[in-house]
Image (tube, coloured by chain):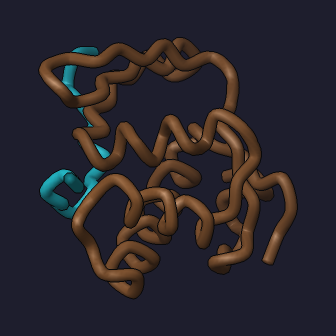
Chain colours: A cyan, B brown
Amino acid sequence: MKKEYSKPALEVLDVK
Amino acid sequence: MNMDTAAVLSLDSVLVQREGNIASDMDGEKVMLNVKNGKYYNLGEVGGEIWEALASPVSIRRIAEIMQEIFEVPAELAQQDVFDFVQNLLNEDLVAIVNGP
C-alpha cells in the first residue's frame, strides 16, 4: 500500500 | 554563492547530503538543523524521504523512482517535484553535486 503523495517543500523555520 | 549553486542540474545529476545537519523525525515529518548556518528546516514527509535517499550519492532520476515506490505519484510529476526540491536543497547548500549532468 503506497502512501498519499504531496508536493515536497523545503520550509525554513524562523528560529534564529 | 559557490560553484555548486551555479551549476545546472539534470535528472542524471548525482548528489549527496553535505555533513553538518542534524535531522529528526517529528510526527512523520523530518525537521533538520544545519549547524553551519544555524537554520532549522522542515522537509515534510516526502521531503524527508528525498533527504534519506540522499544519504549516499544518488541521481535525481533514481530518487524519483524511489518516491514512486513509496508514494502514489506519476513518474513525470515525481521527477519534476524531486528536481525542484533538490534544487532548493542545493541553493541552501545542504547537498553537494557528486557529478554533473
Q: Which residue is the extreme one toward the right?
A: B99
Residue located at (54% from left, 19% from top):
B21
Residue located at (62% from left, 16% from top):
B20
Of B1 and A11, which appears nearest the observer? A11
The image quadrant of residue B88 is bottom left
* Left or right: B30, with B85 as reference point: left
Residue B91 in the image, given as x and y percentages of width and height: 53, 53
Q: Which residue is the extreme one toward the bottom?
A: B76
Q: Is residue A15 above or below residue B72?
A: above
The image quadrant of residue A14 is top left
Of B80 and A10, which appears nearest the observer? B80
Residue B42 in the image, given as x and y percentages of width and height: 26, 32
Residue B53 in the image, given as x and y percentages of width and height: 56, 43
* Left or right: B75, with B63 as reference point: left
Residue B3 in the image, given as x and y percentages of width and height: 79, 57
Could you tell me how many numbered marks the image carries? 0
Q: Quadrant of the C terminus of chain B?
A: bottom right
Of B37 and A2, which appears nearest the observer? A2
* Left or right: B69, with B90 as reference point: left
Q: Is residue B51 above or below residue B15?
A: above
* Left or right: B45, with B36 as reference point: left
Residue located at (70% from left, 43% from top):
B16
Q: Is residue B74 above or below residue A1?
A: below
Q: Is residue B37 above or below residue B77?
A: above
Residue located at (29% from left, 18% from top):
B25
